[in-house]
Amino acid sequence: MTNVTVFKPGAEITIDDADCIGCRKCVEVCPEDVYTLERRPGETDPNREFKSVAVAPEKCILCLSCLEICAKDAIFIYGKQ
Ligand code: SF4
Ligand code: SF4
């Protein structure tokens, strides 16, 4: 009997809204297009105009590139394996 583990993509991803500065690095580094930038409605600080949102966490392959590149440590990922 063979023991085969099939990897299924998907993770729970949260982004700390207080820390995210919308630098876009996670959007650019993610190979699975998990993230997109959204405008913060009513935000008057030009440095906080955008934030990252995990729009497709079900596609995450847990490569952890986004965690490594986020200078603000704003991303938290919980694998579902
Ligand atoms: S890399 Fe970090 S700070 Fe930059 S947009 Fe993504 S979550 Fe926000
Ligand atoms: S761990 Fe990799 S696949 Fe998952 S959201 Fe981050 S960069 Fe994308």
Image (cartoon, helix red, strand yellow):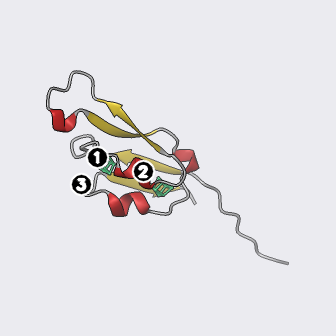
Residue 73 vs residue 29: left or right?
A: left
Which residue is the site of mark 1? 23
Dot placed on the residue nearer the N-terminal end, 1 or 3: 1
Establish whether ligand 1 lies closer than 8 Å to the Cβ of label 2. Answer: no
Near mark 3 (Cα within 10 A), the count class, few <14, some 14-19 or many ≥20, is few
In the depicted view, which residue is nearer to us: 63 or 12?
A: 63
Disc marking residue 72? 3
Q: Tags 1 and 3 in contact by the CB under 8 Å rule?
A: yes
Q: Is the residue indicated by label 3 positioned so its CB lies within 8 Å of ligand 1?
A: yes
Q: Tell me the kind of residue under disc 2.
A: Glu
Crowding near pointer 1: few (<14 within 10 Å), some, many (20+)?
Answer: some
Do the residues under discs 1 and 2 have CB atoms within 8 angstroms? no
Task: Give me the residue at 48% from left, 38% from top.
Answer: 55
Chain-order first, disc 1 or disc 2: 1
Q: Quadrant of residue 80?
A: bottom right
Circle 3: residue type: Lys
**Point 47% across, 53% down: residue:** 30
Q: Is mark 1 within 8 Å of ligand 1?
A: yes
How far apart in space, not on screen, are marks 1 and 3 (Cα)? 10 Å
Query: According to the image, label 2 marks what residue?
Result: 28
Numbered disc 2: secondary structure: helix
Q: What type is the residue that disc 1 sits on? A: Cys
| Lower sequence index among marks 3 and 2 | 2
Q: Point out the image quarter for the N terminus.
A: bottom right
Residue 10 left/right relative to 77: right
Q: Secondary structure at mark 3?
A: loop
Q: Nearer the viewer, mark 1 or mark 3?
A: 1
- Residue 3 lies in what quarter of the image? bottom right
